Amino acid sequence: MILSWLRRGLRTGVLTTRYPVAREEMPREFRGRPALDAERCLAGQGCDRCVQACLPVALSLATVTSSGRDKSAHTAPQLTLDYGRCIMCGLCVAACPADALRMVGDYELASTASDDLRVSAVFTQEADASGRDYEEKNNGRYA
Amino acid sequence: MADTLDKATWEAAEQLQARVQRLLGHSLHIRHIDAGSCNACEAEIKMLLNPYYDIQRLGMFFTVTPRHADMLLVTGCMTRAMVDPLRQTYEAMPDPRLVVAVGACACTGGIFGQSAYTLGGIGGILPVDVYIPGCPPSPLTLIHGLLLALGRAEQRMHHDTRQVKSSRALPMLTPGA
């Protein structure tokens, strides 16, 4: 009987994840975090559907003053996504009419500063040299 | 912050941080405390000990007393009733001690936010070293956060025991923080 147990154990192999050594594949439906694609986002045209859908106010719209190329001050909408508040429910992804928000399977979210958990995009009305009409602010990890 | 400190202080802080990470890097004892959680985070933390995630293979262990602990794992939206017990737990821990906020609630208040009964995150009570977002964070997110606190998050190669310095000095070890 002990032999059959041993054989069964050997056949099962190691089930423990190899996570910190190797990345783990997540299921396609896994809701890691919502990722904001500022290029598609319509917040500059006055859309606020994701902000309305967000329960813990992780998504917020503010009006900021940004200086354009002609150095005059403009007001521009700023969309901020705070992963520290987000509950990864996916309601913003369902509400987005432009597919600017999508759920990605990223699970390495921890950060040493709460400011680093915040990503934002300012939607200036005019395009800059590279043809962008938005300005993203994040620490590069949540792009 | 970095500009206001002179170079010698900054170097001393970095050395101290490296020393702490070397001491705790492969043997970390964790005390978990619930500061008003819904128990979803607890369910995920409990999963760290199952045979699949098994954080004991990474040299991390849970203890039942803060006096034996190197790291305080705080969950929950920081209710006013738990402020004093949380402070006492932190004070009972020996130096050096790390504080990790687990879940959206402990990070910022999450879905509860700030109210008459909750303070909205533990940031105002304790110096938090690592924020782990998510509601609840998956066990893999928790493992990443714990490794980040120890400066081991970049460690990818098998048998690679190098201590990778995190880009940011831990707030706990930053003088004047």
Image (cartoon, coloured by chain):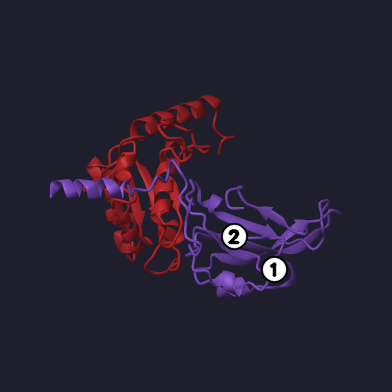
Chain colours: A purple, B red
Rendering coords of residue A76 (x, y %): 74, 63
Point 79% across, 61% down: residue = A74
The spot of residue B131 in percent (x, y) is: 45, 51
Q: Which residue lies furthest to the top in this view?
A: B8
Q: Callout 1 environment at 10 Å: few (<14), some (14 to 19), or many (20+)?
A: many
User: Residue A139 location, x and y as percent?
Assistant: 60, 48
- Residue annotated with mark 1: A43
Amino acid on which the number 2 mark rests in the picture: Ala
- Tell whether A101 sits left or right of B29: right
Mark 2 vs mark 1: same chain?
A: yes
Give the amino acid type for the residue marked by disc 1 in the picture.
Ala
Q: Where is residue A111 in the image (x, y as percent from the top left)?
A: 49, 48
- In the visual, does A35 lie left or right of A77? left
Give the spatial CA distance, label 2 vs label 1. Answer: 15 Å
Give SS at disc 2. strand
Query: From the viewer's perspective, is A40 left or right of A59?
Result: right
Q: Mark 2 lies on which chain?
A: A
The vertical placement of A101 against A116, above or below, is below
Q: Dot 1: what SS? A: helix
Residue A77 position by quadrant = bottom right
Residue ID at (44%, 42%): B148
- B146 or B99: nearer the viewer: B146
Say which residue appears at 31% left-offset and 41% top-offset.
Answer: B57
Residue identifier under label 2: A35
A54 vs B16, nearest the viewer: A54
The answer, for residue B127, to whether it is visible in the render is no
Closer to the camera in the image, B165 or B99: B165
